[in-house]
Amino acid sequence: MIWDFPYDSPSAIIELLERRGFAASKKFGQNFLISAPIRQRIAASMEPLQDAKLWEIGPGLGALTRELLLGGAFVTAFEIDHGFCSILREEAFPEEERFRLIEGDALKTWPAVYEKEGTPDIICGNLPYNVGSICIARFLESQCLPAMMVFTLQKEVADRLGAHAGSKAWSTLSILAQVDYEVTQLFTIKGGAFFPAPQVESAVVRLTKRGHPQVPVSKRTVFLEVVSDLFTQRRKTVRNNLLQGKTGARHGKEGVLEALALASIAESERAEKLDFEQLLRLSQIFQEMGK
Ligand code: SAM
């Protein structure tokens, strides 16, 4: 029997936390999703859940976890708040065989699970701003690449993940994500669907793994290094960013200017204008130059 807690009721949440002697913490971005239709919509976006090996980052009191378990997933939940962990373990899912809890900071705990068990089928989470982008970037950089990831994030981060070249939101995070994933923003969520209500809007994004990555694994290191240099300071030209970064240190001024010319990219261009094809071409030229 899965816990039938009234997750949509702020007073029930307060009462539960008071009874257990805990309080929601701003530090960990604890805003509970208090809309069953939205939780169901998020869970439905990950179908088929039946028997899927799924990681949930930040389960809180288990509101979304419940939907995932009802859908038939094997859930490994990573939660930093020890009070919430005790509620999850003792009250929410004590006898649920498909539920496993990893207590602690997910940024520190997931690598050991990954090393032992490999990539899950799905990763999801409703994540606070600071943790969300770092967590996603770490999965991508470490090549922990499940077939699907679904995150509820501050809309600004969701916009960056799915941004296109030429837009203000086009950034290292967009590029890193889109090397391996198609990114779709599914829907937005107003602050009132959370308790306590945050000031900002949130959005649910789904990352679906591409059949073939946009950058081959063998070219990734140089590609990501060049991208990281290019976006170091958005207001600066590509020339200056490259010269002041690792690329400049490796290839010198002459090499950087030659590569830009060969790639037909103006020295005065801004990185946000460069699309995937141009970035790939430029990094390929640096790769061929060696060093
Ligand atoms: N999933 C629940 C929901 O939708 O109602 C709670 C979401 S709340 C926005 C974020 C959750 O992530 C909280 O439970 C918080 O304690 C947890 N959290 C924050 N930082 C974390 C971290 N570094 N590792 C694991 N959990 C974290």
Image (cartoon, grey):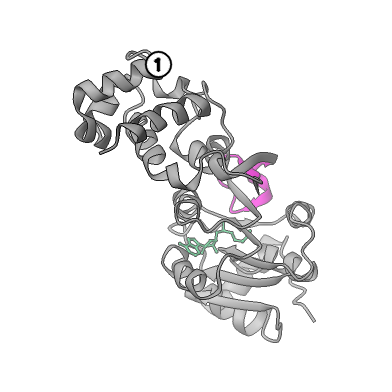
Question: Which quadrant does the C terminus fall into?
Answer: top left
Question: What residue is pinned by disc 1?
Answer: 265
Q: Residue at x 29, y 36 (%)?
A: 290
Q: Residue at x 60, y 82 (%)?
A: 89
Residue 58: image quadrant is bottom right
Q: Does residue 66 appear to the left or right of 168 in the view shown?
A: right
- Residue 199 in view, yes or no: no
* Residue 41 belongs to magenta span: no
Under 8 Å from ligand 1: the CB of mark 1? no
**Quarter, ligand 1:** bottom right
Question: Which quadrant does the N terminus fall into?
Answer: bottom right
Q: Does residue 218 appear to the left or right of 87 in the view shown?
A: left
- Residue 75 in view, yes or no: yes
Q: Residue at x 21, y 21 (%)?
A: 254
From this view, report whether residue 162 is shown above or below residue 271.
below
Residue sitting nearer the eye, 232 or 83? 232
Question: Residue 63: image x %, image y %?
Answer: 69, 65
Residue 27: image quadrant is bottom left
Question: Residue 183: image x %, image y %?
Answer: 63, 40
Residue 159: image quadrant is top right
Q: Does residue 212 appear to the left or right of 108 in the view shown?
A: right
Task: Say which element carries label 1.
Answer: loop
Residue sitting nearer the eye, 144 or 191? 144
Few, some or many residues within 10 Å of mark 1 (<14, 14–19, 20+):
some
Q: Residue at x 44, y 46 (%)?
A: 218
* Residue 191 belongs to magenta span: yes
Residue sitting nearer the eye, 160 or 242? 242
Residue span colored magenta: 188-205
| Residue type beneath disc 1 | Ile
Question: Residue 127: image x %, image y %?
Answer: 54, 54
